[in-house]
Amino acid sequence: MYIKTISVKNFRLLQDSTLQLDQDKKQDLSLLIGKNNSGKTSFIVLFDKFLRPEHYKFNFNDFPISLRNDILNTGTEIDLSHCSIQMVLEIIYSEEDNLENLSEFILDLNPDEHIVKLLFKCDINRSKLESDLSKIEDEKYKRKHIEKSLTDYLETKIYTFSKDDDLSEDKNNQMIEKSISDVRKVINFQVIHAKRNVSSSEHQGSGKTALSELTTNYFNKENLFSQDAFGSINDTIFKMDEELNKQYEVHFKDYFTNVRQFVDEGTGQLNVISDLESKQILSNYSKVVYGSSDTYLPETLNGLGHLNILFLLLQIEIKKRFFEQEKKDINLLFIEEPEAHTHPQMQYVFAKKIKDILKTIQNLQGFITTHSAHIVSQCEFEDIRYFKLDKSNVIIKNFYKELEVKYTSEPEYFQFLKQYLTLYSSELFFAEKIIFIEGVSEKLLLPYFIKKYDQSRDSESDYIPLTSQNISFIEAGANARVFCHFLNFLDIKTLIFTDLDGCKIGISDTKKKYWGGCSTEEAINTTNVTIKYYLNAPELPKIEERETKTNELKLFDDWFKNIKENSVASITPNIKISYQVKENEYHARSFEDAFLSVNLNTINSNKKDINGLKNKSEIKTERTDFFDLTKAILKSDGKSDFASSILYLALTKDVEWNIPKYIVDGLKWISE
């Protein structure tokens, strides 16, 4: 028995959102991820409000903005029936399940149907609200009353139904009302919120810290659930009572001698006895420490990251005891942002171990919300549910299944993507923007270029510096095309810096034709697969077929002419391909000759301090053949040394370098 589908309507940004769980694996763990303010916390809070109504109440701000104006106009002719917060749970069961509790909700007796549908609904008691509003004369105060006091007019009800049509207004009489106590016989809901009272500083008062207090709670719950398990502790306490009674008798002897002179003991002799309780001892006289037996250190001297993980694991253990003792059919556990206050290594450890811990809880369906790339990288991608804000509604995507369909014709790309995201770049899930870079030179120099670009726009009051934006930088080499469907899936604005890589037909010593690198002016083709993929290159005839497939050749030639003119649009508007463009009468082929062409004088002035170069005498300020010059002076393995020297001169000697135009254009686009 397990929950297969969770559907939400009209709760904050979750206006029409559905979370599908994997039917094959019964989805024991779901990883809920997404950018900030994408509805993950609201998803948990909704369960709090429906399943723990005695502690959490709905209010005006829980309704989406699109409905608030209608609610504020209560008393007019506007119908409020659509102003209803709803959550539907679809529960799948099998013939092997114990249906003692679930049978209360089963309406369809068809032996082929094994599904129960529960509707949790929060409606406005319109008549009661209108009655109270009629006593308020000022319209402005009526609206204020609704905003502040709507909670008093909200009614939560639970129904079981068999068909989706039953949810419509004309058929909702088919639904059977149930109570929260009925639901709790089936579902045990527990949650560990992100706001955990963990601090590495010492507190005043009792001196008790969060971990020690939680240890007390754990003991008290265990003592409540299992007296036998703590029998030895209680036996020790009883012996302490006996010893203390003997001491009390001696210490209070004189006192009671005086008392007897004033008090009639007809009702019995007055005594002081020991009445120790295990929970009192643990609460007031026990604490968590660490270290060896002779060098204890207090809990507060442990790192905050360690404290948070220890606190979290103890909370999970307490929830586990609830699940085990109450023996419900479905155990729901929500853990919100376990990475809070923890460093990356602790996040890795938590992600690796948490699934093993949760597997020890029977009938569990766990949900973890996170912004941690480290946690995501250690989890199975099949478990990911991606929360994406689309205008005013959150769409919950099944990352693995939906994306796998997109890569149907490119399975090797999908395989690469899964491994790459796991090993290197899970942070892409949380990025607002992404910049792909192709080579080591760009990797080293791009941060400098970005800082310089930001400085050039300092005077613009509405400009948000790129260094202040949530941008992920990925070095993907020639594999940027692999990410296309993934980037579209997440709908992330992406800039790809790459090289034009022009080429022409060459003839080898064996008279065989091949595509060889050349200047952009001579080029009739590009070897860059990223450009061809994203800028939708037509098929290029093989070299030996160029004379027979003239129509196809013309299509490609026209396309490449437009590529040189930088006038071809990307196949997806959210992804820009930025490559070398004509600048100062020169059209570069790569980053290196583009950089050389706009910085020749500065390079010439500092060439003795620039590594990665050879034939430095070739560098002359009058040269304009930058493609040939780059080949002549740049060592075959010198790109890294060259870029490092350029950066070193900028940072230590304040050498000012010009940024190639195609990089400036790309940074301008991604900044918007």
Image: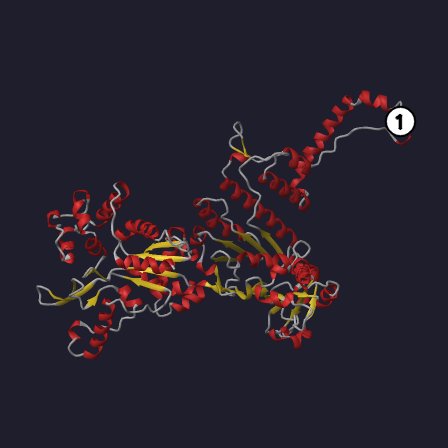
Quadrant where the image shows the N terminus: bottom right
Q: Which SS class for mark 1?
A: loop
**Residue 563, horizontal then vertical, whole percent:** 25, 68
Please, what is the three-letter code of the amino acid marked with disc 1?
Val
Instruction: State the residue in front, 191 or 234.
Output: 191
Residue 559 in sight from this viewpoint: yes
Please tell me which residue is depicted at 59% across the width and 74% down the height of the picture: 112
Q: Considering only vertical position in the picture, is 542 above or below 331?
A: below
The residue that appears at 52% across and 61% down in the rendered structure is 27
Q: Is residue 364 visible?
A: no
Q: Residue at x 85, y 21 (%)?
A: 258
Looking at the rendering, which quadrant does residue 243 occupy?
top right
Answer with left or right where residue 2 lies relative to residue 417: right
On the rendered structure, is 546 left or right of 151?
left
User: In x, y percent, where is residue 65?
Assistant: 57, 64
* Residue 502, position as x, y percentages in the image: 20, 64
Residue 312 to residue 292: above or below: below
Q: Nearer the viewer, residue 131 or 202?
A: 131
Task: Quarter of the image for the C terminus: give it.
Answer: bottom left
How many numbered badges does the structure rendering display? 1
Which one is in front, 360 or 582?
Answer: 582
507 sits left or right of 124 in the view: left
Q: How is the image coloured?
A: secondary structure
Furthest residue in direction top, as rendered: 254
Which residue does the numbered mark 1 point to in the structure image?
263
Q: In this picture, is 266 found above or below 669?
A: above
Asked where in the image residue 331 lies, by quadrant, the reply is: bottom right
Q: Is residue 617 left or right of residue 412?
A: left
Which sits in the foreground, 68 or 111? 68
